[in-house]
Image (spheres, rainbow, N blue to C red):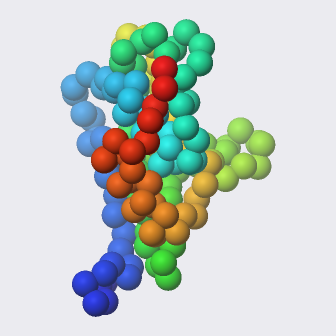
Amino acid sequence: RMAAWQPVSFDAWVATPDDDPIRHRISRKAVDNLSRIGSGAAGALSSGWLRFMPEYSYGEIGLRCRLENGFCQLSGVDGGSAGDDGAGDDSFFILTPGGILPPWIGVKGTGRLIGWNALLDGIDQISSGQVKVEY
């Protein structure tokens, strides 16, 4: 739904197609950008030996945004519950570990609710190169 040419409410879902036969690889920069969207954290791969790998294998990728009252309710792959480990957290997987060849990587989102304008600002910073990812 739109009001004054601005989105007011919607339900958007982007994900790996079911039974996708292609090899799933993702770049280090893309993983850092997904980490930033999911948690606001920067440089997820900036330390440790993983920073030397140019790309990673993954199982599935998925992100859903349900916009209502100026806030986006985020979820991820498999209904979005990565908090099933008994820790009681409200995390969700944007990117699941998997694939045939290592290194495998997963990206967890840790914030389920984000202001719509804050989400747009973060995406704009990533796409315009204003966010510096250090390796």
Instruction: Identify the residue at image location x=42%, y=12%.
Output: 53
Residue 119, image x and y in percent? 45, 61
Is residue 93 in view from this perspective?
Answer: no
**Residue nearest the viewer, comparing 124 with 65:** 124
Residue 120, image x and y in percent? 40, 62
Name the residue at the bottom extreme: 4
In the shown orientation, is residue 41 left or right of residue 29?
right
Q: Quadrant of residue 84?
A: top right
Is residue 123 in view from this perspective?
Answer: yes
Instruction: Identify the residue at image location x=57%, y=64%.
Output: 113
Instruction: Identify the residue at image location x=36%, y=18%.
Output: 55
Position of residue 118 relative to residue 28, above or below, is below
**Residue nearest the viewer, comparing 36 with 13:** 36
Name the residue at the left extreme: 22
Instruction: Identify the residue at image location x=44%, y=54%.
Output: 122
Position of residue 5 relative to residue 17, above or below, is below
**Residue nearest the viewer, comparing 4 with 66:** 4
Image quadrant occupied by the N terminus: bottom left
Position of residue 64 relative to residue 101, above or below, is below
Residue 134, image x and y in percent? 49, 26
Residue 33, image x and y in percent? 42, 39
Q: Quadrant of residue 87?
A: top right
Query: How many labels sit on residues?
Result: 0
Position of residue 32 relative to residue 6, above or below, is above
